[in-house]
Image (tube, helix red, strand yellow):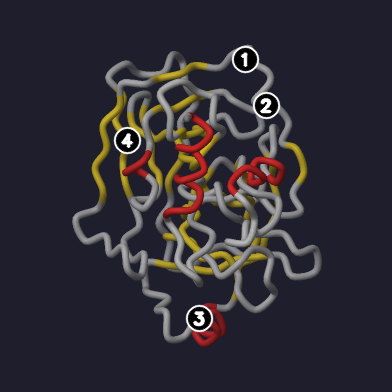
Amino acid sequence: LADATATEALRDSYDDRRLAAQAKIVNGAPAAPGSYPFFVTLYATDDPPSGGPACGGSLVTPSVILTAAHCVESIQSAEYGRYDLNINDGVQARTNITSVSHPDYNPDNFDYDYALIGLDTPFDDPFLVSLRRTPEIPPDLSIMGFGAIRFLSPSIPDDQIFNFLTDELLEANVTRFPTDECRANYDPDPITERMFCANDIPNGRDSCQGDSGGPIVVQGQNVQVGLVSFGDGCGQPDFPGVYSR
């Protein structure tokens, strides 16, 4: 049941174009323990890490997680300090959670794709991410997550999905993609003022299903400028990942 629930969480947030709502880093590398001390893993079960991660998030206070609004309906638990699903040392889990989405969130086009998850019991001695809202997104960025390593097309049977998920937190460096070009490529789907695009065309690095809600940070800094929202497939040169800024 836990696996079925997580599979639904990976599938449910997409239509034919919006396919990166919950994903894994494509062409990424394992993140060293401690490299992203603000990262939170979110699950669609109350018995983490069973069923596998469904989304990511970042810790903004000891008891508040920032994530994507399209994630929170299915989320039942959160873990802090998780870098490997097979290693529990230093991992803290919380199952008594509540959530609130941005009042203007639009599930049809993912505008205002922000949500906060509140914990009844704060995480112990956590590292908090620094949030930055700037007129211009820096060009060099990093993403991380437990999402899919390749696009999970509808043709893949549910019982095979977990063959394409990772046990390790993956990271990748990406570059801001020109907004006007991204907007033209995604037309008629809107890229609003609350979104920006990023990918790594030469190496095919991108966010994918399972990475949703996870932070995108300034490369080499614990400064978050956005979160994983959606995309058309994973690692597609003309369709970069779209992030809520």
Q: Look at label 4 and name its amino acid.
A: Ile
Question: Does the rendering let one see residue 42?
Answer: yes
In the displayed structure, 50 sits above or below 145; it is above
Residue, disc 3? 186
Q: CA distance from mark 3 to mark 1?
A: 40 Å
State if disc 1 and disc 2 touch (CB < 8 Å).
Answer: no
**Distance of mark 2 from mark 4, alpha carbons?**
22 Å
Residue type beneath disc 3: Tyr
- C-alpha gap between disc 2 and disc 1: 8 Å
* Circle 4: element type: strand
Residue 117 — which label?
A: 4
Q: Is residue 101 above or below residue 186?
A: above
**Residue at image mark 2:** 84
For the residues marked 2 and 3, what is the alpha-carbon distance in whole angstroms?
Answer: 34 Å
Work out whether mark 3 precedes mark 4 in sequence or the reverse, and give the earlier one.
4
Mark 2: few, some, or many residues within 10 Å (few <14, many ≥20)? many
